[in-house]
Image (cartoon, rainbow, N blue to C red):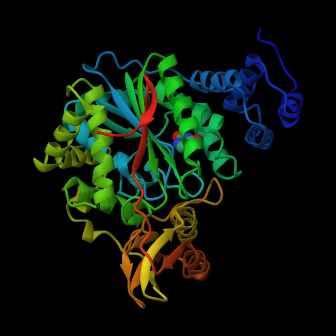
Protein backbone atom coordinates (compact mmCIF):
# COMPACT_ATOMS: atom_id res chain seq x y z
CA UNK A 1 0.00 0.00 0.00
CA UNK A 2 1.33 3.46 -0.80
CA UNK A 3 2.34 5.73 2.05
CA UNK A 4 -0.28 8.00 3.64
CA UNK A 5 0.56 11.63 4.37
CA UNK A 6 -0.99 14.36 6.45
CA UNK A 7 -2.31 16.85 3.87
CA UNK A 8 -2.08 19.79 6.25
CA UNK A 9 1.62 19.04 6.77
CA UNK A 10 2.18 19.00 2.98
CA UNK A 11 0.45 22.36 2.60
CA UNK A 12 2.40 23.76 5.56
CA UNK A 13 5.72 22.62 4.06
CA UNK A 14 5.00 24.40 0.79
CA UNK A 15 3.67 27.45 2.63
CA UNK A 16 6.99 27.65 4.51
CA UNK A 17 9.02 27.37 1.30
CA UNK A 18 10.23 23.78 1.76
CA UNK A 19 10.48 21.25 -1.07
CA UNK A 20 8.10 18.33 -1.37
CA UNK A 21 9.07 14.78 -2.20
CA UNK A 22 7.78 13.11 -5.37
CA UNK A 23 5.53 10.82 -3.36
CA UNK A 24 4.03 13.77 -1.44
CA UNK A 25 3.16 15.51 -4.73
CA UNK A 26 1.75 12.28 -6.12
CA UNK A 27 -0.33 11.73 -2.98
CA UNK A 28 -1.76 15.23 -3.27
CA UNK A 29 -2.70 14.89 -6.95
CA UNK A 30 -4.17 11.40 -6.48
CA UNK A 31 -6.22 12.58 -3.49
CA UNK A 32 -7.56 15.58 -5.38
CA UNK A 33 -8.42 13.56 -8.49
CA UNK A 34 -10.30 10.94 -6.47
CA UNK A 35 -12.26 13.58 -4.57
CA UNK A 36 -10.77 12.72 -1.16
CA UNK A 37 -8.95 16.03 -1.00
CA UNK A 38 -11.42 18.93 -0.93
CA UNK A 39 -11.17 22.09 -3.03
CA UNK A 40 -10.29 24.24 0.00
CA UNK A 41 -7.14 22.26 0.77
CA UNK A 42 -6.09 22.14 -2.88
CA UNK A 43 -6.66 25.91 -3.12
CA UNK A 44 -4.34 26.41 -0.14
CA UNK A 45 -1.71 24.23 -1.82
CA UNK A 46 -1.94 25.98 -5.21
CA UNK A 47 -1.64 29.38 -3.51
CA UNK A 48 1.42 28.18 -1.55
CA UNK A 49 2.92 26.80 -4.80
CA UNK A 50 2.10 30.07 -6.58
CA UNK A 51 3.80 32.15 -3.88
CA UNK A 52 6.83 29.93 -3.15
CA UNK A 53 7.26 28.17 -6.50
CA UNK A 54 8.20 24.57 -7.22
CA UNK A 55 11.75 23.46 -7.99
CA UNK A 56 12.62 21.57 -11.20
CA UNK A 57 12.08 18.13 -9.67
CA UNK A 58 8.79 19.12 -7.99
CA UNK A 59 7.63 20.66 -11.24
CA UNK A 60 8.49 17.53 -13.28
CA UNK A 61 6.75 15.34 -10.69
CA UNK A 62 3.65 17.55 -10.77
CA UNK A 63 3.42 17.04 -14.56
CA UNK A 64 4.01 13.28 -14.20
CA UNK A 65 1.39 12.89 -11.46
CA UNK A 66 -1.15 14.95 -13.40
CA UNK A 67 -0.42 12.99 -16.59
CA UNK A 68 -0.84 9.66 -14.78
CA UNK A 69 -4.05 10.78 -13.08
CA UNK A 70 -5.60 9.32 -16.24
CA UNK A 71 -4.55 7.25 -19.21
CA UNK A 72 -2.21 8.02 -22.09
CA UNK A 73 -4.25 7.55 -25.24
CA UNK A 74 -2.89 5.18 -27.85
CA UNK A 75 -3.58 6.58 -31.34
CA UNK A 76 -1.12 4.27 -33.09
CA UNK A 77 -3.93 2.83 -35.24
CA UNK A 78 -4.23 6.24 -36.92
CA UNK A 79 -1.62 6.61 -39.66
CA UNK A 80 0.74 9.57 -39.64
CA UNK A 81 2.38 11.71 -36.99
CA UNK A 82 -0.21 13.27 -34.71
CA UNK A 83 0.53 16.93 -33.94
CA UNK A 84 -1.18 19.42 -31.65
CA UNK A 85 -0.77 23.06 -30.67
CA UNK A 86 -1.36 24.78 -27.35
CA UNK A 87 -1.25 28.39 -26.29
CA UNK A 88 -0.37 29.58 -22.80
CA UNK A 89 -3.40 31.85 -23.02
CA UNK A 90 -4.22 35.26 -24.33
CA UNK A 91 -6.99 37.71 -25.14
CA UNK A 92 -8.73 37.23 -28.47
CA UNK A 93 -6.56 34.14 -28.98
CA UNK A 94 -8.73 32.07 -31.28
CA UNK A 95 -5.97 30.55 -33.38
CA UNK A 96 -6.71 26.90 -32.50
CA UNK A 97 -10.01 27.10 -34.36
CA UNK A 98 -8.24 28.29 -37.50
CA UNK A 99 -5.11 26.19 -37.54
CA UNK A 100 -6.64 22.86 -36.48
CA UNK A 101 -8.81 22.54 -39.64
CA UNK A 102 -5.97 23.90 -41.82
CA UNK A 103 -3.49 21.29 -40.54
CA UNK A 104 -5.98 18.39 -40.62
CA UNK A 105 -6.97 19.33 -44.17
CA UNK A 106 -3.28 19.15 -45.12
CA UNK A 107 -3.19 15.51 -43.98
CA UNK A 108 -1.76 15.80 -40.46
CA UNK A 109 -3.98 14.35 -37.69
CA UNK A 110 -4.73 16.88 -34.91
CA UNK A 111 -6.12 15.38 -31.68
CA UNK A 112 -6.84 18.62 -29.83
CA UNK A 113 -7.80 18.75 -26.17
CA UNK A 114 -8.45 22.28 -25.00
CA UNK A 115 -9.54 24.18 -21.92
CA UNK A 116 -12.17 26.71 -20.92
CA UNK A 117 -11.63 30.39 -20.21
CA UNK A 118 -8.98 30.90 -17.56
CA UNK A 119 -8.67 34.14 -15.57
CA UNK A 120 -8.93 37.06 -18.01
CA UNK A 121 -8.22 34.81 -21.04
CA UNK A 122 -10.72 33.02 -23.24
CA UNK A 123 -10.82 29.25 -23.76
CA UNK A 124 -11.24 27.21 -26.93
CA UNK A 125 -14.00 25.06 -25.40
CA UNK A 126 -16.18 28.06 -24.55
CA UNK A 127 -15.72 29.35 -28.10
CA UNK A 128 -16.68 25.99 -29.59
CA UNK A 129 -19.73 25.76 -27.35
CA UNK A 130 -20.97 29.09 -28.67
CA UNK A 131 -21.79 27.14 -31.85
CA UNK A 132 -25.31 25.80 -31.11
CA UNK A 133 -25.20 22.05 -30.43
CA UNK A 134 -21.40 21.66 -30.51
CA UNK A 135 -20.37 18.80 -28.16
CA UNK A 136 -16.97 19.15 -26.49
CA UNK A 137 -17.57 16.38 -23.93
CA UNK A 138 -17.02 13.01 -25.55
CA UNK A 139 -15.80 9.68 -24.20
CA UNK A 140 -12.59 8.01 -25.25
CA UNK A 141 -14.16 5.74 -27.86
CA UNK A 142 -15.88 8.67 -29.54
CA UNK A 143 -12.64 10.70 -29.36
CA UNK A 144 -10.84 7.98 -31.31
CA UNK A 145 -13.72 7.56 -33.74
CA UNK A 146 -13.79 11.28 -34.61
CA UNK A 147 -10.03 11.62 -35.11
CA UNK A 148 -10.02 8.47 -37.21
CA UNK A 149 -12.79 9.78 -39.45
CA UNK A 150 -11.68 13.42 -39.84
CA UNK A 151 -8.00 13.54 -38.77
CA UNK A 152 -9.31 16.13 -36.30
CA UNK A 153 -11.08 16.23 -32.97
CA UNK A 154 -11.78 19.31 -30.82
CA UNK A 155 -12.76 18.36 -27.28
CA UNK A 156 -12.27 18.97 -23.57
CA UNK A 157 -10.65 16.50 -21.24
CA UNK A 158 -12.55 13.25 -20.99
CA UNK A 159 -12.76 11.67 -17.55
CA UNK A 160 -9.89 9.42 -18.64
CA UNK A 161 -7.50 12.12 -19.96
CA UNK A 162 -5.60 14.15 -17.35
CA UNK A 163 -8.59 14.40 -14.99
CA UNK A 164 -6.37 16.11 -12.41
CA UNK A 165 -5.91 19.05 -14.77
CA UNK A 166 -9.63 19.28 -15.49
CA UNK A 167 -10.31 19.84 -11.77
CA UNK A 168 -7.25 21.94 -11.03
CA UNK A 169 -7.75 24.20 -14.05
CA UNK A 170 -11.26 25.13 -12.91
CA UNK A 171 -10.03 25.68 -9.35
CA UNK A 172 -7.06 27.87 -10.35
CA UNK A 173 -9.34 29.96 -12.54
CA UNK A 174 -11.29 31.22 -9.52
CA UNK A 175 -8.53 31.31 -6.89
CA UNK A 176 -6.04 33.68 -8.59
CA UNK A 177 -3.44 30.92 -8.94
CA UNK A 178 -3.06 30.78 -12.70
CA UNK A 179 0.11 32.82 -13.32
CA UNK A 180 2.69 30.31 -12.12
CA UNK A 181 5.25 28.65 -14.41
CA UNK A 182 5.14 25.17 -12.77
CA UNK A 183 1.35 25.15 -12.49
CA UNK A 184 0.92 26.25 -16.13
CA UNK A 185 3.55 23.74 -17.29
CA UNK A 186 1.90 20.86 -15.39
CA UNK A 187 -1.51 21.83 -16.70
CA UNK A 188 -0.54 22.15 -20.37
CA UNK A 189 1.88 19.26 -20.63
CA UNK A 190 -0.18 16.71 -18.66
CA UNK A 191 -3.12 16.99 -21.04
CA UNK A 192 -1.02 17.31 -24.18
CA UNK A 193 1.15 14.29 -23.35
CA UNK A 194 -1.96 12.24 -22.55
CA UNK A 195 -3.80 12.87 -25.81
CA UNK A 196 -1.71 10.57 -28.04
CA UNK A 197 0.47 13.09 -29.93
CA UNK A 198 3.90 12.68 -31.53
CA UNK A 199 4.76 16.38 -31.72
CA UNK A 200 3.62 19.66 -30.20
CA UNK A 201 3.76 23.35 -31.15
CA UNK A 202 3.44 25.87 -28.33
CA UNK A 203 2.46 29.52 -28.53
CA UNK A 204 3.97 31.06 -25.41
CA UNK A 205 2.69 34.56 -24.88
CA UNK A 206 4.05 37.57 -23.05
CA UNK A 207 2.65 41.05 -22.52
CA UNK A 208 -0.34 42.76 -20.96
CA UNK A 209 -2.85 40.08 -22.03
CA UNK A 210 -0.68 37.08 -21.17
CA UNK A 211 -0.10 35.29 -17.88
CA UNK A 212 3.60 36.09 -18.26
CA UNK A 213 3.85 39.88 -18.43
CA UNK A 214 7.61 39.87 -19.08
CA UNK A 215 9.26 38.40 -22.15
CA UNK A 216 11.98 36.71 -20.06
CA UNK A 217 9.34 34.91 -17.98
CA UNK A 218 7.64 33.68 -21.16
CA UNK A 219 11.04 32.43 -22.34
CA UNK A 220 11.52 30.55 -19.05
CA UNK A 221 8.01 29.06 -19.36
CA UNK A 222 8.67 28.14 -23.01
CA UNK A 223 11.95 26.43 -22.11
CA UNK A 224 10.24 24.52 -19.27
CA UNK A 225 7.47 23.33 -21.62
CA UNK A 226 9.87 22.31 -24.39
CA UNK A 227 12.15 20.46 -21.95
CA UNK A 228 9.18 18.47 -20.58
CA UNK A 229 8.00 17.63 -24.11
CA UNK A 230 11.48 16.46 -25.16
CA UNK A 231 11.92 14.45 -21.96
CA UNK A 232 8.76 12.55 -22.90
CA UNK A 233 10.09 11.89 -26.40
CA UNK A 234 7.86 14.38 -28.27
CA UNK A 235 9.21 16.83 -30.83
CA UNK A 236 8.32 20.17 -29.28
CA UNK A 237 8.68 23.69 -30.69
CA UNK A 238 7.67 26.87 -28.85
CA UNK A 239 7.28 30.37 -30.26
CA UNK A 240 7.46 33.38 -27.95
CA UNK A 241 4.74 35.76 -29.14
CA UNK A 242 3.49 39.23 -28.33
CA UNK A 243 0.22 39.69 -26.41
CA UNK A 244 0.40 43.44 -25.83
CA UNK A 245 -2.88 43.78 -27.69
CA UNK A 246 -5.68 41.30 -28.38
CA UNK A 247 -5.18 39.05 -31.41
CA UNK A 248 -7.42 40.23 -34.21
CA UNK A 249 -10.34 42.53 -33.45
CA UNK A 250 -12.79 40.32 -31.54
CA UNK A 251 -12.83 39.21 -27.91
CA UNK A 252 -15.67 36.99 -26.67
CA UNK A 253 -16.81 33.53 -27.63
CA UNK A 254 -19.08 33.77 -30.68
CA UNK A 255 -17.45 37.04 -31.79
CA UNK A 256 -14.18 35.13 -32.03
CA UNK A 257 -15.70 32.17 -33.86
CA UNK A 258 -17.08 34.66 -36.38
CA UNK A 259 -13.60 36.12 -36.87
CA UNK A 260 -12.21 32.59 -37.39
CA UNK A 261 -14.78 31.95 -40.11
CA UNK A 262 -13.51 35.03 -41.95
CA UNK A 263 -9.89 33.96 -41.42
CA UNK A 264 -10.66 30.51 -42.84
CA UNK A 265 -11.93 32.30 -45.95
CA UNK A 266 -8.56 34.13 -46.06
CA UNK A 267 -10.14 37.45 -45.06
CA UNK A 268 -7.77 38.59 -42.28
CA UNK A 269 -7.15 40.07 -39.80
CA UNK A 270 -3.46 40.26 -40.65
CA UNK A 271 -1.98 39.35 -37.24
CA UNK A 272 -4.26 36.34 -36.98
CA UNK A 273 -3.39 35.05 -40.42
CA UNK A 274 0.34 35.59 -39.89
CA UNK A 275 0.48 33.67 -36.61
CA UNK A 276 -1.98 30.97 -37.68
CA UNK A 277 0.08 30.20 -40.79
CA UNK A 278 3.33 30.12 -38.80
CA UNK A 279 1.89 27.70 -36.23
CA UNK A 280 0.08 25.53 -38.75
CA UNK A 281 3.10 25.57 -41.08
CA UNK A 282 5.22 24.28 -38.17
CA UNK A 283 2.64 21.59 -37.40
CA UNK A 284 2.54 20.52 -41.06
CA UNK A 285 6.36 20.32 -41.03
CA UNK A 286 6.47 18.33 -37.77
CA UNK A 287 3.73 16.08 -39.14
CA UNK A 288 6.06 15.17 -42.03
CA UNK A 289 4.00 16.83 -44.79
CA UNK A 290 6.57 19.54 -45.58
CA UNK A 291 10.37 19.67 -45.85
CA UNK A 292 10.62 22.91 -43.87
CA UNK A 293 8.51 25.31 -41.82
CA UNK A 294 8.50 27.68 -44.82
CA UNK A 295 7.06 24.98 -47.06
CA UNK A 296 4.54 24.19 -44.31
CA UNK A 297 3.45 27.84 -44.31
CA UNK A 298 2.93 27.77 -48.11
CA UNK A 299 0.82 24.60 -47.75
CA UNK A 300 -1.15 26.22 -44.93
CA UNK A 301 -1.94 29.25 -47.11
CA UNK A 302 -2.93 27.00 -49.99
CA UNK A 303 -5.33 25.03 -47.78
CA UNK A 304 -7.16 28.28 -47.00
CA UNK A 305 -7.15 29.46 -50.63
CA UNK A 306 -8.47 26.19 -52.06
CA UNK A 307 -11.32 26.03 -49.50
CA UNK A 308 -10.25 22.68 -48.03
CA UNK A 309 -9.56 24.12 -44.57
CA UNK A 310 -13.04 25.68 -44.42
CA UNK A 311 -14.61 22.42 -45.61
CA UNK A 312 -12.74 20.56 -42.84
CA UNK A 313 -14.11 23.10 -40.35
CA UNK A 314 -17.66 22.51 -41.58
CA UNK A 315 -17.14 18.73 -41.38
CA UNK A 316 -15.87 18.77 -37.81
CA UNK A 317 -18.56 21.17 -36.58
CA UNK A 318 -21.18 18.90 -38.14
CA UNK A 319 -19.59 15.72 -36.74
CA UNK A 320 -19.50 17.14 -33.21
CA UNK A 321 -23.17 18.15 -33.32
CA UNK A 322 -22.76 21.85 -34.18
CA UNK A 323 -25.16 23.84 -36.34
CA UNK A 324 -23.32 24.48 -39.62
CA UNK A 325 -25.94 26.93 -40.84
CA UNK A 326 -24.42 29.63 -38.55
CA UNK A 327 -20.95 28.78 -39.82
CA UNK A 328 -22.12 29.23 -43.39
CA UNK A 329 -24.05 32.39 -42.50
CA UNK A 330 -22.59 33.98 -39.33
CA UNK A 331 -24.90 37.01 -39.68
CA UNK A 332 -27.85 34.75 -38.81
CA UNK A 333 -26.50 34.24 -35.25
CA UNK A 334 -28.56 35.76 -32.43
CA UNK A 335 -27.32 39.22 -31.39
CA UNK A 336 -26.59 40.64 -27.91
CA UNK A 337 -29.46 42.74 -26.56
CA UNK A 338 -27.26 45.65 -25.54
CA UNK A 339 -24.24 47.33 -27.04
CA UNK A 340 -22.19 50.44 -26.35
CA UNK A 341 -19.34 52.28 -28.03
CA UNK A 342 -16.18 53.74 -26.55
CA UNK A 343 -15.28 56.90 -28.46
CA UNK A 344 -11.92 58.59 -28.67
CA UNK A 345 -11.69 61.70 -26.46
CA UNK A 346 -9.05 63.25 -28.76
CA UNK A 347 -7.11 63.02 -32.03
CA UNK A 348 -3.98 60.87 -31.94
CA UNK A 349 -2.63 57.34 -32.18
CA UNK A 350 -3.57 54.23 -30.22
CA UNK A 351 -0.48 53.82 -28.04
CA UNK A 352 -1.59 51.15 -25.58
CA UNK A 353 -4.38 48.59 -25.37
CA UNK A 354 -4.16 46.90 -21.97
CA UNK A 355 -5.25 43.43 -23.03
CA UNK A 356 -5.62 42.22 -19.43
CA UNK A 357 -8.24 44.93 -18.89
CA UNK A 358 -9.90 44.13 -22.22
CA UNK A 359 -10.12 40.49 -21.05
CA UNK A 360 -11.51 41.56 -17.65
CA UNK A 361 -14.10 43.85 -19.27
CA UNK A 362 -15.15 41.04 -21.60
CA UNK A 363 -15.52 38.71 -18.60
CA UNK A 364 -17.59 41.40 -16.84
CA UNK A 365 -19.86 41.62 -19.90
CA UNK A 366 -20.54 37.87 -19.56
CA UNK A 367 -17.92 36.16 -21.73
CA UNK A 368 -16.06 34.53 -18.79
CA UNK A 369 -16.56 33.13 -15.29
CA UNK A 370 -16.19 34.61 -11.82
CA UNK A 371 -17.17 31.35 -10.10
CA UNK A 372 -16.62 27.75 -11.29
CA UNK A 373 -20.31 27.19 -11.89
CA UNK A 374 -20.99 30.43 -13.84
CA UNK A 375 -22.40 30.07 -17.37
CA UNK A 376 -20.77 32.11 -20.13
CA UNK A 377 -22.78 34.22 -22.54
CA UNK A 378 -21.78 33.33 -26.13
CA UNK A 379 -22.55 36.76 -27.57
CA UNK A 380 -20.95 38.90 -24.85
CA UNK A 381 -17.63 40.55 -25.65
CA UNK A 382 -15.80 43.36 -27.33
CA UNK A 383 -15.01 44.26 -30.90
CA UNK A 384 -12.07 46.60 -31.41
CA UNK A 385 -12.38 49.28 -34.06
CA UNK A 386 -8.69 50.17 -33.78
CA UNK A 387 -5.41 48.41 -33.12
CA UNK A 388 -2.05 49.60 -31.75
CA UNK A 389 -0.51 52.33 -33.91
CA UNK A 390 -3.78 53.20 -35.67
CA UNK A 391 -4.67 56.87 -36.15
CA UNK A 392 -7.84 57.93 -34.38
CA UNK A 393 -9.95 61.09 -34.56
CA UNK A 394 -11.82 62.68 -31.66
CA UNK A 395 -15.27 61.04 -31.43
CA UNK A 396 -14.30 58.03 -33.54
CA UNK A 397 -15.25 54.57 -32.20
CA UNK A 398 -12.34 52.75 -30.56
CA UNK A 399 -14.34 49.67 -29.60
CA UNK A 400 -17.86 48.31 -29.20
CA UNK A 401 -19.03 46.22 -26.23
CA UNK A 402 -21.81 43.60 -26.36
CA UNK A 403 -23.79 42.12 -23.48
CA UNK A 404 -27.16 40.79 -22.36
CA UNK A 405 -26.68 42.25 -18.85
CA UNK A 406 -27.22 46.02 -18.85
CA UNK A 407 -26.22 46.21 -15.16
CA UNK A 408 -22.56 45.44 -15.97
CA UNK A 409 -22.12 48.05 -18.69
CA UNK A 410 -21.03 50.87 -16.38
CA UNK A 411 -18.26 48.78 -14.80
CA UNK A 412 -17.12 47.53 -18.22
CA UNK A 413 -16.95 51.08 -19.61
CA UNK A 414 -14.95 52.17 -16.56
CA UNK A 415 -12.42 49.37 -17.12
CA UNK A 416 -12.23 49.95 -20.88
CA UNK A 417 -11.75 53.71 -20.61
CA UNK A 418 -8.55 53.10 -18.64
CA UNK A 419 -7.41 50.29 -20.96
CA UNK A 420 -6.80 52.42 -24.05
CA UNK A 421 -4.12 55.12 -24.13
CA UNK A 422 -3.99 57.69 -26.95
CA UNK A 423 -0.88 59.77 -27.68
CA UNK A 424 0.16 62.40 -30.20
CA UNK A 425 2.95 60.28 -31.62
CA UNK A 426 2.74 56.88 -33.24
CA UNK A 427 4.16 54.09 -31.03
CA UNK A 428 7.00 51.85 -32.23
CA UNK A 429 5.75 48.71 -33.93
CA UNK A 430 6.38 45.50 -31.94
CA UNK A 431 7.26 42.11 -33.44
CA UNK A 432 4.49 39.51 -33.25
CA UNK A 433 6.98 36.65 -32.80
CA UNK A 434 10.28 37.22 -30.99
CA UNK A 435 11.94 33.84 -30.31
CA UNK A 436 11.75 30.17 -31.09
CA UNK A 437 12.68 27.36 -28.70
CA UNK A 438 13.28 23.74 -29.75
CA UNK A 439 15.72 20.88 -29.17
CA UNK A 440 18.58 23.18 -30.21
CA UNK A 441 17.73 25.74 -27.54
CA UNK A 442 16.45 29.29 -27.75
CA UNK A 443 17.13 31.79 -30.56
CA UNK A 444 15.74 35.00 -32.09
CA UNK A 445 12.93 34.23 -34.52
CA UNK A 446 13.43 34.60 -38.25
CA UNK A 447 11.86 32.74 -41.11
N1 LIG B 1 -3.38 26.80 -20.60
C1 LIG B 1 -3.57 25.65 -19.88
O1 LIG B 1 -4.00 24.63 -20.41
N2 LIG B 1 -3.27 25.68 -18.59
C2 LIG B 1 -2.80 26.77 -17.95
O2 LIG B 1 -2.55 26.71 -16.78
C3 LIG B 1 -2.62 27.96 -18.70
C4 LIG B 1 -2.92 27.94 -20.03
The residue drawn where x is 43% and y is 33% is 443
| Res. 321 in view | no
Residue at the limit of the structure toward the top, as seen here = 1
Instruction: In the displayed orientation, state which residue is furthest to the bottom.
Output: 395
- How far from the left and from the top, in percent, is residue 286? 30, 26
Residue 434 locus on image (x, y percent): 43, 45
Q: Residue at x 38, y 39 (%)?
A: 445
Q: Position of residue 38 (x, y in %)?
A: 77, 38
**Whether residue 219 is situated above or below residue 262 in the rendered picture:** above
Q: Residue at x 83, y 17 (%)?
A: 4
Taking the image as shown, residue 84 lies to the left or right of residue 14, namely left
Instruction: Answer whether residue 352 is visible to the viewer in this image.
Output: yes
Residue extending farthest to the left is: 306
Residue 243 lies, with reference to residue 333, above or below; the image says above
Q: Is residue 48 left or right of residue 397?
A: right
Query: Which quadrant holds residue 15?
Result: top right
Ligand 1 resides in the quarter of the picture at top right
User: Is 221 placed left or right of 247 in the picture?
Assistant: right
Viewed as shown, does residue 250 lie left or right of 99? right
Instruction: Give the image quarter of residue 426.
Output: bottom left
Q: Considering the image in quadrants, where does the N terminus appear?
A: top right
Q: Give 294 or 303, whichever is nearer the viewer.
A: 294
Looking at the image, which is closer to me, 413 or 398?
A: 398
Q: How many marks?
A: 0
Q: Quadrant of the C terminus?
A: top left
Q: Nearer the viewer, residue 385 or 96?
A: 385
Q: Position of residue 212 (x, y in %)?
A: 59, 48
Instruction: Please name the residue shown 44% across and 63% down the image.
Output: 252
Amino acid sequence: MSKKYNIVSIIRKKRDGESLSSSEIDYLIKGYTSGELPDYQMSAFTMAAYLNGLNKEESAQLTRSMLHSGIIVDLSMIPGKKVDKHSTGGVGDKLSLILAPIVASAGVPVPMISGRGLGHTGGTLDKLESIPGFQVDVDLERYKEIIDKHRLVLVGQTKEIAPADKKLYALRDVTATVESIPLIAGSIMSKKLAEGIDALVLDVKYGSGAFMKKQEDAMELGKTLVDIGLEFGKETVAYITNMNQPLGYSVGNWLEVEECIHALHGEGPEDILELSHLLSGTMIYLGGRAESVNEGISISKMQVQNGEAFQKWLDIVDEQGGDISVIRDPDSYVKAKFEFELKSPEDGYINEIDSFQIGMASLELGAGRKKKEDAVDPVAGIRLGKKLGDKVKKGETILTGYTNKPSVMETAVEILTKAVVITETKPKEEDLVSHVIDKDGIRAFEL
